[in-house]
Amino acid sequence: QVQLVESGGGLVQAGGSLRLSCASSGLTFSTYLVGWFRQAPGKEREYIASISRSGGYTDYIDSINGRFTISRDNAKNTVYLQMNSLKPEDTAVYFCAAEYTSNPYVVTTSLYDYWGQGTQVTVSS
């Protein structure tokens, strides 16, 4: 049974930092690209970043580029999202997802095979 479990969310003041983790089990983690998505209240889920299977390629949307860093540790079957300089508009439920692909990045939500349950990030002004 494949599981992706996000952790590390919480309440933080604007300008603060959080590190999200996405721990996986039940799959050969190093053969999966992993993406991070977020969904704010009343909005659609949006892609924000992804990391290739080896970690050699990362992709970010413009609004988080330079503030967030995605990384992975295949030995620990875990992907991380370091979030710095957080803004109130970053408030959302954050999800990780995995896709079995050799592509360097994937932005399309429907292409991902497995999803975590999400972790809430709230940034106060």
Image (tube, rainbow, N blue to C red):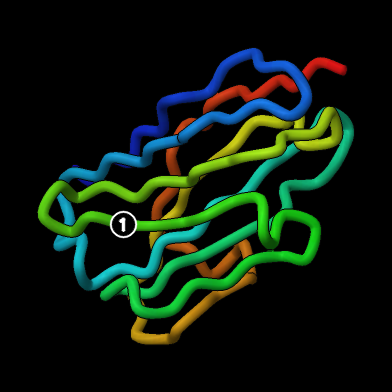
- Residue at the limit of the structure toward the bottom, as seen here: 103
Q: Of the residues shown, which amino acid type is indicated by label 1? A: Arg
Against 27, is 124 above or below?
A: above
> Is residue 108 toward the left or the right of residue 57 in the image?
right
Apparent side of residue 56 relative to residue 60 in the rendered image (left or right): left
Of residues 47 and 27, which is closer to you in this image?
A: 47
Q: Residue at 72% of width from left, 47% of height from top?
A: 45
The percent coordinates of residue 106 (x first, y second) are 55, 75
In the image, residue 11 above or below residue 28:
above
Residue 75 image offset from top left, x and y in percent: 11, 55
Residue visible at 52% across and 55% down in the picture: 69
Q: Residue 93: where, in percent of width, then height?
A: 65, 31
Report the label total: 1
Residue under the image location 58 percent in, 41 percent down: 83
Q: Quadrant of the N terminus?
A: top left
Q: Give residue 12's quadrant in the image.
A: top right
Q: Secondary structure at mark 1?
A: strand
Q: Residues within 10 Å of mark 1 (few under 14, many from 20)?
A: many
Describe residue 112's horizontal placement relative to residue 5 as left or right: right
The residue located at (70%, 38%) in the rendering is 85
Residue 73 shown left or right of residue 46 in the figure: left
Where residue 65 sits, quadrant-wise, is: bottom right
Image quarter (top left, top right, bottom left or bottom right) of the C terminus: top right
Which residue was labeled with disc 1?
72
Residue 124 to residue 40: above or below: above
Work out whether residue 99 or residue 51 is closer to the camera in this orientation and state it: 51
